[in-house]
């Protein structure tokens, strides 16, 4: 009814010119009330009595909500037995596995704060995170013990709980994992009481104690995630219960075709708001089965598509490229697919067209949608649901959010159509950075309207019909002889060439132009670099770009470097070029 009632509503109400995107929402959607419950309470209330529905699917082990809640309650009781109090910070360094999700909700139930970090973080990064949070308890995937043991021994940690990926596997698979992978892992000595296994931890429950449920307020700190923000320095992002639940409610509005018992592939990692918020908390609140993938495995990814027939999948552009190049997918039927959503990085128009052709060829009746946001706003703040999915756009602000485009220097709001910094105000905007008021004040600024706005560090514009377009990261702008050049625009052109798999453009020093663009290119499998190919690419650039935007140099790489978040690490390329220039 939502979209139909919206059309009727628009006949009788004049559009709000300052927020034209509201015309895409129904009257009911506009009047949404964001919950004041805790994360745990909201999820439980949304599930209701449907405890026989499947919450998690981990390597074909399908865990019902009934068993899911039992595990959370046991975990919460054990945390209390170990002395974790309301407001304490508990660090989780685990991949996408049921135990990580149990701990997250258990922490919230007793009022503790979950600090979630990347399992592939360096030892120095983990040392920094533990020092910043002053965490006393760490849940660590067991194969990382050797990597982090020295950091752990010098930290404030009282106890480290080692968790094996096999914990929730079926027996046969668990035995296979032990014999092929776990047997190689080094483990702490039994005499070292600072470590405990997951199974021992879950048995550390006082059966006589009553179930504990903290009085958690909606604006209390619930979660810490980590990001480089707009400056690249590590920061802990403080997310409240209200922030996190609002994101789930917003997502519920934008996936109106999703029904209980539908299935979602949760391949995006939970140390990121996109993975934890959109691919775990949201589906659990919608009673959708979350199929967990702790790591990307092409064969298992194909098996999930073939056997489980998921209705929803979210991923980054590299995931779609991998899917389309996987020959196993040639005969996969995707007719059941309701939503396929891309986020985490810019999806070029050429890639968008290619993916849609692939989907339609495999029977899907949907196009790929895009989400845009930051970890500082939990996840997406803008989304292209059907009707707003224009090529090259990032959609419209999610319900409850307000967007505006500002001059990066003056913070003055710019009119529709003009490019400036994207600023966001809404219920999911973070509380601030942990122990970093200076950086918090830099990214969260109070404007003339007395509201606090999140400065994204991204450039874009809003069309008169309310649809938002992303153009470029503000920090990556290259000034060439006084002209502003945006690397994303050059990358967009080069990516159109059929031989190009990935491209990254940076500014490199020049004797009189100050900086000029240089393109780093990773070619598709089987394609070899050549002078002829380089000429083709320059010709392509000349046909679509201003003269000062054409790359002055092209370097082919076997592989472009990636960040932990699977984006091309342009900062590493910039550092390499700067060192070469100094030499």
Image: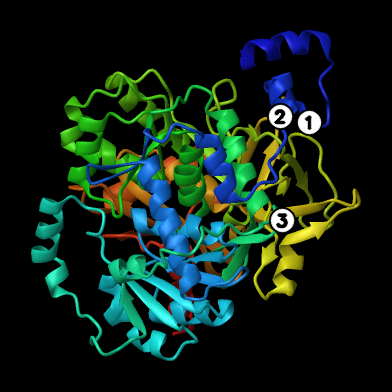
Residue 497 vertical placement versus 486 (above, below): above
**Mark 2, other Cα within 10 Å: few <14 / some 14–19 / many ≥20:** many
Earlier residue among tags 1 and 2? 1
Q: In front: mark 3 or mark 1? A: 3
Earlier residue among tags 3 and 2? 3
- Return the x and y of residue 478 as percentages of the image width and height: 60, 59
**Mark 3, other Cα within 10 Å: few <14 / some 14–19 / many ≥20:** some
Residue 432 visible somewhere in the drawing:
yes
In the depicted view, which residue is nearer to us: 431 or 389?
431
Residues at marks 3 and 2 touching, judged by CB atoms closer than 8 Å: no
Q: Residue 162 lies in what quarter of the image? A: bottom left
Quadrant of the frame with the N terminus: top right
Q: Residue at x 59, y 25 (%)?
A: 388
Q: CA distance from mark 1 to mark 2?
A: 7 Å
Tell me the SS state at disc 1: loop
How many marks the image carries: the answer is: 3
In the depicted view, which residue is nearer to us: 521 or 141?
141
Q: Residue at x 29, y 18 (%)?
A: 363
Q: Which residue is mark 1?
A: 19
Residues at marks 1 and 2 touching, judged by CB atoms closer than 8 Å: yes
- Return the x and y of residue 379 as percentages of the image width and height: 56, 48
- Determine which of the numbered discs, if any, sits on residue 219 in the image: 3
Q: Residue at x 31, y 27 (%)?
A: 358
The image's colour scheme reads rainbow
Q: CA distance from mark 3 to mark 2?
A: 30 Å
- Return the x and y of residue 27 as percentages of the image width and height: 74, 20
Q: Which residue is mark 2?
A: 466
**Mark 1, other Cα within 10 Å: few <14 / some 14–19 / many ≥20:** some
Q: Is residue 440 left or right of residue 200?
A: right
Q: In front: mark 1 or mark 2? A: 1
């Amino acid at each position: 009814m939502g979209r139909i009632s919206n059309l009727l509503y628009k006949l009788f109400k004049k559009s709000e010119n300052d927020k034209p995107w509201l015309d895409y929402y129904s009257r009911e959607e506009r009047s949404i009330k964001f919950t004041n419950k805790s994360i745990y309470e909201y999820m439980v209330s949304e599930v209701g009595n449907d405890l026989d529905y499947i919450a998690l699917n981990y390597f074909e082990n399908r865990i019902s909500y009934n068993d899911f809640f039992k595990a959370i309650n046991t975990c919460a009781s054990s945390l209390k037995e170990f002395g974790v109090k309301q407001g304490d910070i508990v660090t989780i360094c685990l991949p996408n596995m049921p135990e990580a999700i149990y701990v997250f909700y258990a922490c919230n139930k007793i009022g503790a704060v979950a600090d979630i970090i990347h399992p592939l973080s360096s030892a120095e990064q983990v040392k920094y995170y533990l020092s910043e949070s002053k965490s006393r308890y760490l849940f660590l995937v067991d194969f990382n013990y050797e990597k982090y043991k020295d950091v752990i021994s010098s930290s404030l940690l009282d106890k480290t709980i080692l968790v094996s990926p096999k914990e929730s596997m079926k027996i046969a698979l668990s035995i296979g994992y032990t014999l092929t992978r776990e047997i190689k892992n080094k483990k702490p000595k039994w005499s070292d009481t600072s470590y405990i296994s997951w199974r021992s931890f879950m048995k550390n429950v006082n059966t006589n104690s009553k179930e504990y449920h903290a009085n958690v307020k909606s604006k209390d700190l619930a979660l810490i995630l980590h990001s480089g923000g707009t400056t690249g320095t590590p920061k802990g992002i403080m997310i409240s219960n209200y922030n996190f639940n609002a994101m789930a409610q917003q997502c519920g509005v934008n996936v109106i075709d999703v029904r209980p018992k539908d299935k979602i592939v949760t391949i995006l990692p939970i140390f990121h708001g996109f993975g934890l918020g959109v691919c775990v908390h949201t589906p659990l609140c919608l009673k959708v089965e979350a199929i967990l993938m702790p790591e990307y495995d092409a064969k298992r990814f194909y098996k999930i598509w073939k056997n489980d027939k998921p209705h929803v999948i979210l991923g980054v552009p590299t995931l779609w490229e991998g899917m389309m190049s996987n020959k196993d997918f040639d005969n996969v039927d995707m007719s059941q697919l309701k939503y396929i959503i891309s986020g985490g990085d810019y999806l070029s128009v050429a890639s968008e067209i290619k993916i849609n052709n692939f989907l339609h060829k495999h029977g899907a009746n949907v196009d790929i949608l895009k989400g845009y946001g930051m970890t500082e706003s939990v996840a997406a703040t803008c989304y292209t649901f059907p009707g707003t999915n224009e090529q090259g756009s990032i959609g419209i602000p999610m319900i409850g959010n307000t967007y505006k485009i500002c001059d990066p220097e003056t913070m003055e709001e710019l009119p529709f159509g003009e490019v400036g910094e994207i600023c966001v105000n809404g219920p999911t905007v973070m509380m601030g950075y942990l122990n970093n008021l200076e950086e918090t004040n830099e990214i969260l600024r109070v404007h003339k309207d007395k509201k606090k706005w999140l400065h994204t560090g991204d450039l874009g514009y809003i069309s008169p019909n309310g649809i938002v377009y992303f153009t470029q990261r503000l920090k990556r702008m290259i000034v060439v002889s006084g002209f502003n050049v945006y690397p994303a625009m050059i990358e967009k052109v080069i990516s159109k060439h059929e031989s190009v798999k990935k491209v990254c453009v940076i500014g490199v020093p020049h004797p009189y132009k100050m900086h000029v663009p240089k393109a780093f290119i990773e070619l598709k499998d089987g394609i070899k670099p050549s002078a002829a190919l380089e000429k083709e690419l320059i010709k392509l650039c000349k046909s679509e770009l201003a003269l000062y935007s054409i790359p002055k140099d092209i370097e082919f790489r076997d592989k472009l470097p990636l960040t932990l978040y699977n984006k091309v690490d342009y900062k590493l390329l910039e550092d390499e070029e700067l060192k070469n220039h100094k030499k």
